[in-house]
Image (tube, rainbow, N blue to C red):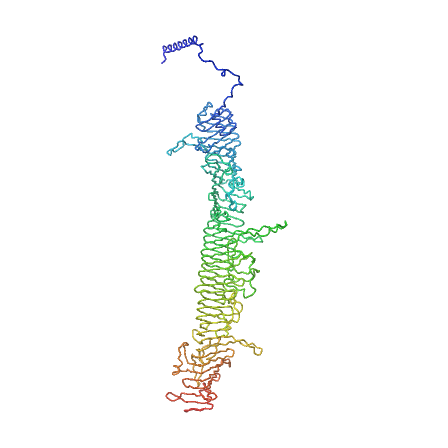
């Protein structure tokens, strides 16, 4: 504590010390003990002095130059303050504290330095310039020096305002520049928010060669702040964190954005496909690699700055009752002179920043200067209706949700319930469609990138094929699962999955399957036009293009069905059709043959060409190339097979099949075009048809392959038809059926009836001749034939293209049977056998006899039958012998009427009788002369019988002839049939050692004749002999013997007349 005593002692001490110092200086102060000053240190003139060292720049000025540039006006401002805690630098000329406590600075320049976390990159700097600024601090400001210890909690900047971000580079030509013309611009620290109601113009100079620009009215900017030393346990950021950047920028209205993206991007369009070539430098491409994008909306725009990826959101901000507003995106193709457009209600973009900086040095490389800017990484457009249009691709699409992803080079459009799109007049409807850019395959020479399209189902497409008249042909395609458009090798591939169907109502064509695939061949390069007068350009413009895509292949898988005017595929597991151009020198398919017989159709002839409108529809392989369309069409073919393959040649305006192959339960059917015809019916395991200019070659195989062409049917393991040579053949077991107007004996029938032939070795047919081998069995109406070899000759050629349906059916001209021949005829009436006729021989031939004119009148037709023995003839009918040796008649079967014959007036009803004839040498029958002849050891047995197949032993039956039976043996037997009183009458002559035996008599003679008209039996002994007749009188008595040169027996009266003979053992003449 200071007491008066202590104060006095302190003052006395200072006084004593001062007195002693003054005394010392007075006594010893004049003594100089230092050496003299060298001359070089003497005082000199000002001009002789050395230059002063450069004054070091202050840290504040260095910071201002780093932020605003070396020659910036901020370094000359009167006020320059750095706030190290905020990494902030202020520069102004005027400082004034307002009555409300705010600080007025004019003009104001502020630089914000983000924390430098990487030594390899330039520090990020944000600068703000304004004409007048009012700053509000957390504590009152009295002096300028107080700003360093205060925190800005609010600000208002007016006048022209500029905000710049250096993008962490030292260059000035890539900065982000924001300009606000009038302001005011507000800042509030507790909200980390900057906002203004004035217009804003943002320019991003990192995009080369043109900057990205954004215009808008009213904005909000949300700032980022740092939290040093934050731990996971901290729930909130510490107050007073320095600003480290911008989190979000929002424009409130009238947004107009201009963006330049990679020209190879497929955002809002197809950039075009070019063949892969060595990469070119950006210096050589320049601005050609950039596409101009504009985005406009009357609504809001939010821009979120994120690490490595920015997010931009455009929102039209539709409200109930408000005017309609929308987001419009345009992409300009400078090279094409076209615009692609997207219209929606909300658009979200993920933007990837490309700064082109070298991560090692932090210095932008000059060769990458054109790679800087922004690219659209993803884009999503939503709204009640999203509309996408492309002038370059002639496309307009409508949906609810559009998504683009640059990483996968894909764009997806969704709709609820569906999207619809129009491209070059074609309409698409489906729930979702995705377009993807696929890179070219480097392994394939000449490969190009292409666009892959995928649409989910259910959906449908309506396509149009333009005609010269300008009218379109609508073709529709439907699917339920997926539509895929891609590329396979050099061909474009279209795939429809799930109940896929093509429909062409105008052409009446339809093709459906579980999966349909269509391959399109690349268009051929158009020939270089020759120099022509200017007038020729009009003709060239009017001519149709020749370089269009053509169908290369069509494939249907699973439940394949097709409907067209000429072909109906009812069911198939797989359908494949290949197309190719005609060979050189064949500009048009050959015209059909003028021969009317060649205009008929086989299962192959009308089989289909593949007619494609859009993709693929029906098949049509054999329609005439020319015609007025008025001719009557044949019914369509109906085809069923497990697998169908066809090869088609594409001629201008017409397709022609080259080959067709089907397998697996093949069935081809065609209904007849006229009443009375039978159409076409083909069945087998496989069917192969090959085109020929004069006719097709057809092969049908299977366990029982069947081919019917109207009146002709061929069955076998392999049926071969060659229409060009008009030949058909079968190797192996088979059958053939065709209509004929004659029976096996050559007699003309009242109508054409089917003639069916079976064999077990082979068959050959050439139109007029048919040859069969092995186990032949033939059947025609009531007749049957069996042999080992059969040859049939027809009176006219049967066309294998016409199927024997041109004119009247062919008649059998000659028929030759060999080895074990057996011919039967059975006639029934109401399930009752009324007539049976059988011929057995070693060989048998039937030959048609020519007609002879008689007195100018045309004679009736006839034929002859020849059989070689040993042989046998059986006839079972009412009365038996009355028609014993008559040729088989084509008349209707006889009615079973009662016939009375007796020696008295009693009446008896005739019964069925069997006539059995055997011969050793031959048999001959002539229908014109109504004669039949049997030669050598002829034996005849006639007796009542109901069974035509009864076994007969002629040697044993003689000992016990049945009642009413009669036996005859001779060397030759001639039978003549005549007409008398409308009734057939027979005359029989037996010659050479004739023996006749019955129950009541038997006899021998050289010749025996029978006249049915007179009912007389005449025994003739010949020139040097006598006839002998034995008549039984009663049981146990010897027979009566009658001898004479001629004996006549009247069957009606039972009387005998003897010429030059006698009656022995009783009896009379």
Q: Give coordinates of residue 244: x percent, y percent.
A: 45, 32
- The answer to whether residue 22 shows anywhere in this view is yes
Screen quadrant of the N terminus: top left
Q: Is residue 220 visible?
A: no
Give percent across and percent down for residue 266.
50, 44
- Tell me where residue 1043 appears, x and y as whole percent: 44, 89
The quarter holding residue 238 reads top left
Q: Nearer the viewer, residue 471 or 639?
A: 639
Please name whichever residue, 1018 or 761, is drawn nearer the observer in this view of the structure: 761
Judging depth in this view, the residue of 906 and 1002 nearest the camera is 1002
Residue 739 pos. (x, y %)? 49, 69
In the rendered image, the vertical position of residue 596 relative to residue 890, given as above or below: above
Q: In which quadrant of the rendered view does residue 30 lie?
A: top left
Tell me if 911 is positioned left or right of 291 in this view: left
Number of numbered discs on residues: 0
Residue 204's place in the image compared with 11, above or below, is below
Quadrant of the drawing holding the C terminus? bottom left
């Amino acid at each position: 504590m200071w007491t008066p005593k202590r104060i006095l002692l302190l003052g006395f001490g200072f006084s004593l010390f001062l007195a002693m110092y003054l005394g010392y200086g007075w006594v010893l102060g004049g003594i100089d003990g230092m050496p003299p000053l060298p001359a070089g240190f003497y005082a000199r003139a000002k001009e002789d002095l050395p230059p002063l060292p450069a004054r070091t720049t202050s840290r504040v000025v260095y910071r201002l130059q780093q932020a605003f540039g070396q020659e910036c006006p901020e370094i000359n401002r009167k006020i320059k303050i750095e706030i190290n805690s905020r990494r902030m630098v202020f520069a102004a000329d005027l400082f004034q504290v307002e009555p409300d406590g705010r600080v007025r600075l004019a003009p104001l320049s502020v630089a914000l330095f983000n924390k430098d976390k990487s030594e390899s990159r330039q520090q990020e700097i944000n600068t703000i310039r304004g004409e007048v600024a009012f700053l509000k601090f957390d504590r009152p400001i009295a002096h300028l020096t107080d700003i360093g210890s205060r925190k800005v909690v609010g600000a208002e900047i007016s006048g022209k305002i500029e905000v710049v971000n250096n993008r962490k580079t030292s260059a000035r030509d890539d900065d982000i520049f924001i300009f606000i013309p009038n302001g005011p611009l507000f800042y509030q620290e507790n909200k980390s928010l900057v906002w203004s109601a004035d217009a804003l113009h943002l320019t991003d100079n990192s995009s080369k060669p043109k900057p990205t620009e954004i215009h808008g009215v009213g904005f909000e900017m949300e700032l980022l702040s740092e939290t040093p030393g934050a731990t996971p346990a901290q729930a909130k950021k510490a107050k007073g964190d320095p600003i480290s950047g911008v989190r979000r920028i929002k424009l409130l209205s009238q947004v107009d954005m201009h963006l330049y993206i990679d020209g190879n991007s497929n955002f809002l369009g197809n950039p075009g496909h070019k063949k892969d070539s060595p990469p070119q430098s950006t210096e050589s491409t320049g601005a050609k690699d950039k596409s101009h994008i504009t985005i406009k909306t009357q609504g809001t725009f939010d821009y979120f700055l994120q690490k490595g990826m920015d997010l931009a959101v455009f929102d039209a901000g539709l409200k109930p009752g408000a005017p309609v507003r929308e987001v419009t995106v345009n992409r300009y193709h400078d090279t094409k002179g076209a615009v692609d457009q997207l219209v929606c209600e909300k658009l979200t973009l993920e933007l990837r920043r490309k700064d082109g900086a070298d991560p090692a040095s932090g210095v932008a490389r000059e060769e990458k200067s054109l790679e800087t800017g922004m690219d659209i990484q993803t884009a999503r457009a939503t709204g009640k209706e999203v509309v996408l249009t492309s002038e370059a691709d002639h496309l307009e699409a409508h949906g609810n949700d559009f998504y683009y992803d640059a990483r996968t080079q894909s764009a997806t459009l969704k709709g609820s319930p569906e999207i619809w799109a129009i491209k070059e007049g074609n309409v698409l409807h489906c729930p979702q469609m995705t377009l993807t850019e696929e890179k070219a395959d480097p392994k394939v020479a000449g490969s190009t990138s292409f666009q892959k399209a995928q649409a989910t189902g259910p959906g449908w497409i309506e396509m149009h094929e333009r005609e010269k008249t300008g009218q379109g042909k609508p073709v529709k395609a439907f699917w339920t699962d997926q539509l895929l458009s891609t590329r396979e090798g050099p061909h474009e591939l279209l795939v429809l999955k799930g109940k896929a169907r093509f429909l062409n109502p105008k052409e009446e064509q339809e093709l459906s399957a579980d999966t349909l695939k269509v391959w399109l061949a690349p268009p051929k390069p158009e020939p270089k036009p020759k120099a022509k007068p200017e007038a020729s350009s009009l003709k060239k413009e009017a001519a149709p293009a020749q370089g269009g895509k053509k169908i290369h292949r069509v494939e249907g898988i699973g439940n394949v069905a097709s409907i067209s005017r000429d072909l109906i595929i009812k069911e198939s597991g797989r359908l494949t059709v290949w197309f190719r151009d005609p060979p050189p020198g064949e500009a048009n398919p050959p015209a059909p043959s003028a021969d009317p017989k060649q205009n008929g159709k086989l299962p192959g002839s009308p089989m289909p060409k593949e007619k494609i409108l859009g993709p693929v529809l029906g098949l049509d392989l054999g329609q005439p190339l020319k015609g007025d369309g008025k001719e009557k069409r044949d019914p369509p073919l109906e085809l069923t097979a497990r697998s169908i393959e066809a090869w088609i040649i594409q001629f201008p305006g017409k397709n022609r099949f080259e080959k067709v192959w089907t397998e697996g339960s093949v069935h081809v059917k065609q209904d007849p075009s006229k009443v009375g015809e039978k159409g076409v019916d083909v069945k087998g395991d496989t069917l192969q048809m090959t085109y020929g200019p004069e006719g097709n070659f057809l092969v049908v195989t299977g366990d029982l392959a069947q081919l019917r062409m109207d009146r002709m049917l061929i069955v076998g393991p392999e049926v071969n038809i060659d229409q060009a040579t008009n030949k058909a053949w079968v190797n192996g077991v088979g059958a053939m059926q065709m209509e004929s107007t004659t029976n096996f004996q050559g007699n003309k029938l009242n109508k054409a009836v089917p003639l069916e032939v079976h064999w077990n070795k082979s068959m050959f047919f050439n139109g007029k001749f048919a040859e069969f081998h092995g186990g032949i069995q033939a059947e025609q109406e009531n007749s049957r034939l069996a042999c080992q070899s059969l040859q049939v000759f027809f009176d006219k050629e049967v066309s294998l293209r016409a199927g024997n349906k041109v004119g009247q059916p062919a008649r059998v001209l000659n028929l030759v049977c060999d080895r074990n021949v057996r011919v039967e005829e059975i006639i029934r009436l109401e399930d009752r056998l009324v007539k049976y006729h059988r011929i057995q021989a070693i060989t048998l031939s039937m030959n048609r006899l020519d007609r002879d004119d008689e007195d100018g009148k045309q004679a009736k037709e006839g034929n002859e039958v020849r059989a070689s023995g040993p042989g046998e003839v059986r006839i079972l009918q009412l009365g038996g012998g009355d028609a014993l040796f008559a040729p088989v008649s084509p008349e209707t079967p006889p009615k079973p009427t009662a016939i009375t014959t007796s020696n008295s007036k009693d009446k008896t009803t005739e019964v069925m009788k069997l006539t059995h004839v055997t011969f050793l040498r031959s048999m001959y029958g002539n229908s014109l002369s109504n004669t039949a002849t049997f030669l050598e050891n002829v034996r005849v047995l006639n007796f009542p019988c109901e069974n035509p197949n009864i076994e007969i032993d002629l040697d044993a039956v003689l000992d016990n002839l049945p009642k009413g039976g009669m036996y005859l043996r001779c060397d030759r037997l001639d039978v003549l049939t005549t007409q008398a009183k409308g009734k057939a009458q027979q005359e029989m002559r037996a010659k050479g050692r004739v023996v006749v035996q019955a129950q009541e008599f038997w006899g021998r003679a050289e010749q025996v004749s029978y006249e049915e008209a007179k009912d007389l039996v005449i025994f003739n002994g010949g020139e040097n002999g006598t006839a002998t007749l034995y008549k039984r009188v009663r049981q146990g008595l010897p027979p009566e013997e009658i001898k004479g040169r001629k004996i006549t027996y009247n069957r009606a009266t039972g009387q005998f007349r003897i010429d030059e003979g006698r009656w022995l053992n009783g009896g009379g003449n």
